[in-house]
Amino acid sequence: MKHNVASMDVSVSAATFSSFLKCSRKGYFLSRNISAPSAHFSDMEGRLLALYKAEATGRLGDRLPVLTNFRDVTRASLATVPGVDCTTAVYRVSGQASRYDVARNRTSTDAEGPIPVMFSPWDKPELIDSLLICFGAIALAQVSDIWASAGMLIYGTGYRRKLVKTNQYFAQVYPVLETVRKAHEADVAPPVVLNSHCSTCDFQSQCRQLAIDHDDLTLLRGMTEKERSKIKRKGISTITQLSYSYRPRRRRRKRSADEISTSGPGRPVTVARNDQALRALAIKKQQAHIQRAPSLRIEGTPVVLDVEGMPDRDFYYLIGLRFTEGNKQVQKSFWANGPEGERDIWQECLRTLQLTNKPQIVSYGAYELRFLRRMQARYGGADKYVERLLATAINLVDCLYGKIYFPTYSNSLKEIGRYLGIEWAWLLASGSAAPLMRRTWELGGHETFKRDLIAYNIDDCRAAEKVMQTVVQICQGASPLNLVDVRSLEVGFQHPIGKFDGALPDFEKINGAAYWDYQRTKVYVRTSKAIRKSVGGRSLPQAKGSVDRHVVVGDAPPKCRRCGANQFWAYRRDSSHVVYDLKFTRRGIKRATVQYHYGKHICSACRCEMTTYQPPPSQYGPNLRAFLVYLVIELRLSYRTACAHVLSLFDVRVPTSIAQEIKSEFALRYQPTYKQILRELANGALIHADETRGVVNGRGHYVWVFTNLTSVAYVYAKSRDRAVLDELLAGFKGVLVSDFYAAYDGVPCPQQKCLIHLMRDINEDLHKNPFDEGLRDIATHFGALLRDIVATIDAHGLKAWHMRKHTKAAERFLEHVRTLKCEAEIGLALQKRIVKNEDKLFTFLHYDGVPWNNNNAEHAVRAFTRLRNVIGTSTPKGHRDYATLLSIQQTLHYRGGGLLEFLRSGRMEIA
């Protein structure tokens, strides 16, 4: 039966509040007094805090106020209570009224009260410590009506004191209290969400088992919350469901040497990535999957290195080595009682390595390799030897990541080691729990903690050695594991259209009978009278139209071009050549087909063959060729549609291959015109620049767009790097208007960033984050400033004389943004973006004819994208041809001209 708890008070202890900060499910359990399966970590944390409090109290003496348990604080005893221990604080949450009670208690008061005190045994204070102090102040205000504006944090091995202003953390504490209240009212435990805190939580076994039972996605430790949300929006909520979404990636073709050289130095052809869908498939099948064969070369004696340290003090206290010497397995452990012993254990470790025959360090992760570098930097000695160790060291994680997927929820050493048969003596072993045990031992804990840590380190070495041996066996093809090569899962690319490759002869015949033309002419004519009539009465178009005019070329030539004789024999009198062309009149266009008749003659003296008429290389006239280019470039018709258009209107059949050749011929002819447009842009006073993708043989290349108010140029490039800008804009001294792509920042000229881009981004962020005060403040000031500037431009145009009056307002806006204190991530990112580009946002105020947006380039980009949607995939040469002809067409459009008239005129320069 569900209890009615909405009207009941909830007592939130400091331990419960701290648990809610780490995990809402754990906090819920503690608030309901639900016991954990184990009390190992809670007992250890309680013991550690008690030992640290006792030691701090003895060390600080009078410098530490006398602390009182929160339960003993009353209104009458406030004057005699110097300090309150925050770990004993209790806050009562009672429905919606709690918000107003706390707000009232935060008001300033002249009364003096006790100060909340918090202890932390770690050398680096964390946010949770400050939040607990603020929680203590809130709880204290509830019982005393006095708000403690500051609290004290005692932390670290030096027992340092830090003053914490509680007002700064109230906005972060209150949402947690609201979460506690809502969880109490719901009376249902929050769902399982495994996180980094689980490794030191007493509920970990219970939550993990529940997650396994539900096949929950949070078991995959490498998957972020953002990735989980994206996957859940697709309807995938379990690991098994995720496994069905795996699709083997198509193998990339091998790149040529030229492509590799243009991709830039240090850029690998393929980058390893962790495919969560493939990991889910490995878990579902309980088989290890190999994405790519790992490479592991053992060139000496492999020495497994595992190091334990204290992250808050940057101090290493335990080094473990494991290697084989002869037929004997050697295990070394070096323990340091304190930071002063770190040098000694490093030197002992170094001596052990120097006595080993050609040691090659093997580690699981980069932590041990960073350890070697830091020890070399701190203590020196044997520098060349350590450098050689680092140069030959093997990181096993690099061998596994993106290559081998074991049926485990992550690549952690614990999970893979247990899958390979290694067990840890410390059942709750983890890298996060080890510092907790070490700190407890330092403050007077039992010696069993030290033994457990050394045993844990030895087990880590054993597991890393087992992983190394497994990877070596996989490389040699002798692994005992049940492995699956991902290449065996690949499915060849299947073309939905095109020639049908039938596995059986009957399939070929069945597929042929399913074509539309076949069914219409062979089947439907026997079914429908209307279809029979339309098919039977349809006349196929003529391949070539009838001749409109005949031209007879003269008889024999006057003399032989070789010997000069004037006697000829006529041996072929009926030779002819037909030219298909168009004739443009004031009332329209009509076909003009001319057939030339001529004869061939042979010189009677030297037998040289001659004729008075030389047929042109193409049977299609210049007007028809220009009209085809006009259809493809200006009207954006495909080759097939353009040729069908010509056939339908003029009864002239042009193969699509000929249409492509005509386009390439015109692009080559107008190369000088194209280069002249580029020179005019580079020598001008203004350039708008943008870029967009082109599709080249299934790969994404780019087309750059450069334009001003009268000219447009499209430039094909294999990449999006700034090499194109360096080449085309070399020596440009005008103003460059662009978006916020970083490549444009390297052009040495005055620049204007597109404020429309900025406004759209701000508008989108405001819709997604309506309560971000910093973002709204910047947006309000930016909108007011830009509104006034646009009003001036509408009244007077782009005249610097009138726009300069807004210069001071722009400077005030930039200064306001620089000094604004943004706390939220989106507002802070916008602030950094504006400050970074502050010298490029209002350049247009100082120049005539420079717009404040990049709409000119965007308009030109849209012209290419509309053409790209028609041409689809092309070759690099095809993209260059399209870029040349489209540049001429758009330049003519900007200048009020037409492409068809220009192509027919034969002119090479654009007026």
Image (tube, rainbow, N blue to C red):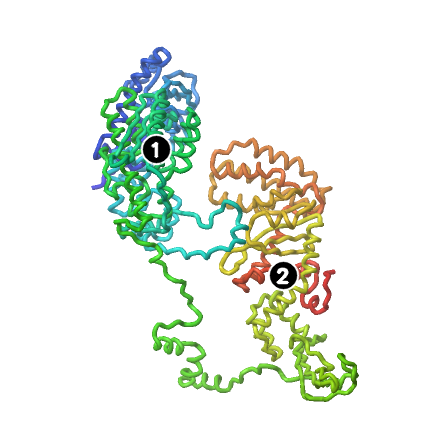
Amino acid type, residue under disc 2 in the picture: Leu
Pointer 1 residue: 21
The quadrant in which residue 711 appears is bottom right
The residue at 25%/22% (across/down) is 445
In depth, the one of 823 and 688 nearer the eye is 688
User: On screen, 90 above or below 630?
Assistant: above
In depth, the one of 631 and 487 nearer the eye is 487
How many dots with numbers? 2
Left or right of 695, for residue 523: left
Secondary structure at badge 2 equals helix
Alpha-carbon neighbours of circle 1 within 10 Å: few (<14), some, or many (≥20)?
some
User: Mark 2 or 1, which is nearer the eye?
Assistant: 2
Dot 2 and dot 1 residues touching (CB under 8 Å): no
Locate the C terminus and report the quarter of the image it occupies.
Answer: bottom right
Pointer 2 residue: 886
Residue 582 showing in the rendered view: yes
Mark sitting on residue 412: none
Q: Position of residue 398 (x, y in %)?
A: 38, 42
Left or right of 257, for residue 558: right
Secondary structure at badge 1 equals helix
Q: CA distance from mark 2 to mark 1?
A: 60 Å
Left or right of 321, for residue 779: right
The quadrant in which residue 451 appears is top left
In depth, the one of 409 and 474 nearer the eye is 474
